[in-house]
Image (tube, rainbow, N blue to C red):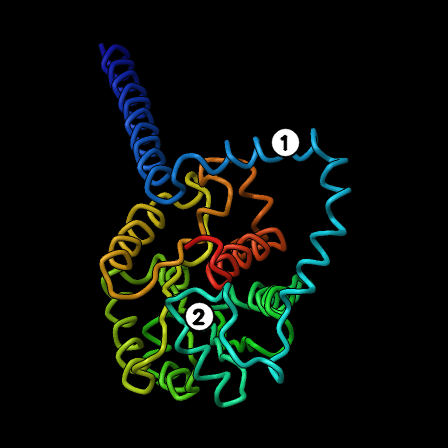
């Protein structure tokens, strides 16, 4: 009799474990579907694959046209010392900032403000995306028109940054364009997204107070795989995206330029929890496309 009772208990336990796993897997699948739709647009990977195939098929044509393209880029490169008007490719959103900088004969100041994801924090030899952005802007507009600086605050939480007034230092920089990554990954596991947004709004108040004409762009932290960090995606990134979309600021969802959070390929874009070189490249390319008007 005791053996039967024990066997029954074991059977019930096994069924409970299996049922729990089934529910958990279903929940992850639902989160993945929602995140894929809301964060990646659902078509990025297919478009990238198609573009890759087309590039292979037309390789000779691309090579033949490369010299002409390089000549065109040289013709549209701008020398700040000779520039009288705003370049045509400057997006209208910050045309006035560029015009003012040209009139004052100074570069347009861009400040990237955020966590260790803005730097080579672990000294692995990567070129961080703000540096890549500076190079990309110079290639597109010519040397001197834009200047990118970085305030990277390591693994500090948004609460620590706000408490120490580090956002006030950023606000005092007088930048024309602010790129803000509000420490979402650093807050992950310790703070709710409501806390992160509260601290972000303190930062925004300081920036706007000092720089009422500045353009502000909000960005999520780096992606993580769906099965490595489902709560990070569902409880922090998605709500942050909703907040940013409804705000009066620009939302630069650079996740659209990364592999899907469900894809194994995403791991090639990360080194631990931070962007690898491929990740920095993807991040930089997305921001550069915005600054050059390619994704308006």
Task: Point out the image quarter for the C terminus.
Answer: bottom left
Badge 2 vs badge 1, beta-carbon distance below 8 Å: no
Residue at left offset 44%, top offset 49%:
255
Q: 280 or 41, which lies in front?
A: 41
Vertically, is 82 above or below 134? Answer: below
Q: Circle 2 — which element? A: strand
Q: Earlier in the sequence, mark 2 or mark 1?
A: 1
Number of numbered discs:
2
How far across and how far down the image is residue 229, in percent? 40, 46
In the image: residue 211, left or right of residue 285: left
Badge number at residue 1: none
Q: 82 or 139, which lies in front?
A: 82
Residue at left offset 22%, top offset 58%:
246
Badge number at residue 114: 2
How far across and how far down the image is residue 180, in percent? 40, 69
Vertically, is 60 above or below 88? Answer: above
- Quadrant location of residue 71? bottom right
How far across and how far down the image is residue 263, in percent? 50, 35
Q: Nearer the viewer, mark 2 or mark 1?
A: 1
- Quadrant location of residue 27? top left
Q: Circle 1 — which element? A: helix
Q: Farthest residue in the front direction?
A: 84
Vertically, is 257 above or below 23? Answer: below
- Quadrant location of residue 147? bottom right
Could you give the CA–CA distance between mark 2 and mark 1, rounded to whole angstroms? 37 Å
Asked if residue 33 shows in the view, the reply is yes
Badge number at residue 54: 1
Task: Point out the image quarter for the N terminus.
Answer: top left
Residue at left offset 45%, top offset 50%:
223
């Amino acid at each position: 009799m005791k053996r039967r009772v024990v066997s029954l208990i074991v059977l019930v336990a096994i069924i409970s474990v299996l049922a729990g796993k089934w529910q958990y897997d279903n929940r992850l699948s639902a989160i993945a579907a929602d995140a894929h739709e809301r964060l990646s647009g659902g078509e990025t990977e297919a478009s990238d694959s198609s573009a890759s195939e087309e590039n292979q098929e037309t390789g000779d044509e691309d090579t033949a046209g490369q010299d002409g393209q390089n000549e065109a880029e040289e013709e549209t490169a701008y020398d700040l010392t000779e520039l009288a008007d705003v370049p045509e490719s400057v997006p209208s959103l910050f045309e006035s900032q560029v015009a003012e900088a040209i009139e004052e004969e100074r570069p347009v100041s861009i400040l990237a403000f955020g966590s260790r994801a803005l730097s080579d924090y672990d000294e692995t030899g990567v070129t961080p995306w703000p540096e890549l952005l500076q190079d990309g802007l110079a290639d597109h507009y010519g040397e001197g028109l834009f200047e990118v600086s970085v305030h990277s605050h390591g693994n500090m939480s948004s609460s620590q940054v706000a408490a120490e007034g580090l956002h006030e230092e950023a606000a005092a920089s007088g930048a024309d364009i602010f790129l803000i990554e509000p420490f979402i990954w650093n807050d992950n596991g310790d703070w709710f997204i409501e806390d992160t947004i509260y601290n972000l709004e303190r930062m925004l108040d300081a920036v706007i107070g000092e720089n009422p004409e500045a353009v502000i762009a909000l960005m999520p932290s780096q992606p993580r795989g769906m099965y490595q960090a489902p709560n990070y995606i569902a409880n922090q990134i998605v709500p942050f995206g909703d907040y940013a979309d409804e705000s009066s600021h620009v939302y630069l969802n650079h996740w659209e330029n990364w592999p899907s959070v469900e894809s194994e390929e995403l791991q090639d874009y990360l080194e631990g929890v931070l962007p690898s070189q491929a990740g920095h490249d993807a991040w930089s390319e997305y921001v550069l496309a915005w600054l050059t008007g390619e994704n308006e």
